Image (tube, rainbow, N blue to C red):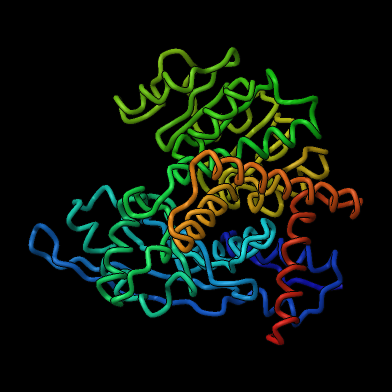
Amino acid sequence: MIEVQEVLSSSLYAQQLKKLYHVGNVLGLPQDVLESLSIPERVLQVKISIKGDDGKIKTFLGWRSQHNSALGPYKGGVRYHPNVTQDEVIALSMIMTWKNSLLLLPYGGGKGGIKLEPRKLSKRELEEVSRKYVESINKYVGSEIDIPAPDVNTDSQVMAWFVDQYIKTTGKIDFASFTGKPIDLGGLAVREYSTGLGVATITKRASEKLLDGLNDKTVVIQGFGNLSYYAAVFLSQMGAKITGISDSKGAIYNPNGIDVQKVKEYKDKNGSVSEYPDAKKMTNDELLIQDCDILIPGAIENVITKYNAPKVKAKLIVEGANGPLTADADDVMKQRGVPVIPDILANSGGVVGSYIEWANNRMGQIMEEDEAKKLIISRMEKAFDEMYKEYNKLGDQDFRTSAMAIAVERVIKAMKARGGN
């Protein structure tokens, strides 16, 4: 039996280690193997200094964590956020390793981030920061080494700056080095909505297995960024009723249903959903405990803890965000009999979309949008069915443990086959 030292920190990395070691206990993995999986293969820290529009020097810290490459080149997004830390980036790169493994993608796990508030920078300043970040890490990325993609507060424009700077710095015409690019630079339209499509696909599949289908089920979604918006759109098309939505400024709830497109139009015009007139206004924390059949925490990590988990009324939780439930919250939900579909499966539509874009770039742009969409749905459904089979096989375990068991074992087998440590 593996004993994990008590981790006092509530950081995302600490939570991921708890989850990894729990899976290790279930699988009977040796301590040395788990220690190896706990530590990233490489972590880059870079200092980025630019001359601001006010003439003053602005300095930022950036990171790129490359967790494991047993299954292939590292793959994962780059986020821009004032609260980004090295610890968080390492944790997210670990999550990407399990996600790519579970979805049978030929990748290891990577993640990047720059500690900044994008809204406080001009477009010129943001472009210069982006280009200098790529200049700093160019030796360690590329289509056969590490393929970054969009994440929190980054988009196709940032990826365009990334790939352009990479080509200028290295002299390699390699558009497959970054994914989530504009269509004119080898991107795919499906990449914009692939994460939301994946969340909706998994929610539908889980509802068919664990509830009595998705039709007319009430769904509360915390968040209204790209992922949550498209998840809400696709779930509405699949027959679900969206009853709650939120953003960083507040949440809205209407048990009779919310028109997703009207809320989107309102947010685009007013900057937030929080004052939308046809729903009850509340906080994000309050939204998590409203009556609903399905809860999708799709904003940030660690929002459901041992303190609010007993108050959650949903019959099914689907993790849209990375790490929205702490390890303690997992335990509470298991005791209560509330199934949780883990992030490494539920929100992996984005990386499947990135994989299709990467492969399409390398093949010479031969993929059509409808074909790409079908591939995402097929790959997500196959992974869910495999997780569900493992869940029934393990017996007294939850879905996260079942999904991670598949992913971790694949990585370990690849490491052993390659003769690495």
Residue at point 31%, 69% (across, down): 133
- Location of residue 10 with respect to 350 vertically, above or below: below
Q: Quadrant of the C terminus?
A: bottom right
- Location of residue 363 with respect to 136 vertically, above or below: above
Whether residue 388 sits left or right of residue 194 in the image: it is: right
Instruction: Tell me which corner region of the image, top left, top right, bottom left or bottom right, holds residue 168.
Output: bottom left
Residue at point 60%, 42% (across, down): 198
- Location of residue 58 with respect to 316 vertically, above or below: below
Along the viewing direction, whichever of 106 and 124 lies nearer the viewer = 106
Instruction: Tell me which corner region of the image, top left, top right, bottom left or bottom right, holds residue 10.
Output: bottom right
On the image, the x and y values in percent for residue 338 come to: 78, 37
Whether residue 88 sits left or right of residue 241 in the image: it is: left
Q: Quadrant of the N terminus?
A: bottom right
Residue at point 71%, 52% (across, down): 328
On the image, the x and y values in percent for residue 212 come to: 80, 25
Residue at point 60%, 52% (across, down): 323
On the image, the x and y values in percent for residue 31 come to: 78, 79
The mark total stands at: 0
From this viewpoint, which residue is outermost toward the left? 55
On the image, the x and y values in percent for residue 237 come to: 58, 23
Along the viewing direction, whichever of 148 and 25 lies nearer the viewer = 148
